Amino acid sequence: MPKRKILRAVLAALLLLELAAIFQLSHEPAAQSDLTSAAFTSQMLAADSDYLAASQAERDARVQSMQKGVRTLAHLSEYILLGLTAAAFALTFDRSLRGALLAVGGCVLWAVGDEIHQYFVPGRSCQLADVAVDSFGALLGAAIAWGLLRLGTAVLKKRKDDSHE
């Protein structure tokens, strides 16, 4: 099997896993989603000795105050990864900027669909701000993929030119 087909298969599998993970996280009712992000935030803060020395009420307040930022970073991170994977997959078919931009378009459509899906999940809502953060993340991820492709292409060209001298 040619290397490009293997790469496509691996990227397709990763893409499907990422989409399934995003769907699963979006399908959590609000109470469960709050617990998930609170647990993650608490784990991050556990490295801070001041946090550990604080009372439970102070720790809870600190976690609560960070929830919006943590959730925004989670959206951004998951869509950077999605944009990177989607663009890498698309670029195995079309190595032009158009391939990367088509991948971003697909990620934006997924973000819109994801927010519509959340509208029907108990306690969750459809947030235009989340679509904006997700779209920006997908664009960043695709830009990373595009940049890596361009860099890799330049390195290979340089090696080829150097070997012919």
Image (cartoon, rainbow, N blue to C red):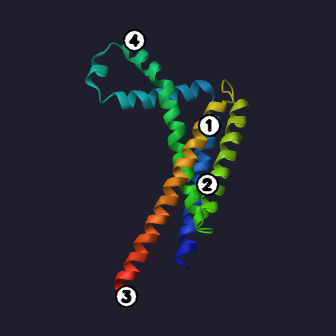
Which residue in the structure is indicated by mark 3?
164
- Point out the residue furthest to the front here: 165
Q: Which of pointers 4 and 3 indicates the residue nearer the eye? A: 3
State the separation of the CA atoms marked 4 and 3.
69 Å
Residue at x 48% of width, y 65% of height: 150
Residue at x 67% of width, y 51% of height: 105
What is the secondary structure assignment of the residue under circle 3?
Answer: loop
In contact (CB < 8 Å): disc 2 and disc 1: no
Q: Quadrant of residue 22?
A: top right
Residue 158 is left or right of residue 111, and the answer is left
Q: Which of pointers 4 and 1 indicates the residue nearer the eye? A: 1
- Point out the residue furthest to the bottom here: 164
Q: Which of pointers 3 and 1 indicates the residue nearer the eye? A: 3
Q: 118 and 80: which one is in front?
A: 80
What is the secondary structure assignment of the residue under circle 2?
Answer: helix
| Mark 2: amino acid | Leu
State the separation of the CA atoms marked 3 and 2.
42 Å
Which residue in the structure is indicated by mark 4?
57
Residue at x 37% of width, y 13% of height: 58
Q: Which of pointers 2 and 1 indicates the residue nearer the eye? A: 1
Residue 54 is left or right of residue 152, and the answer is left
Q: Earlier in the sequence, mark 2 or mark 1?
A: 2
Q: Earlier in the sequence, mark 4 or mark 3?
A: 4
State the separation of the CA atoms marked 2 and 1.
22 Å
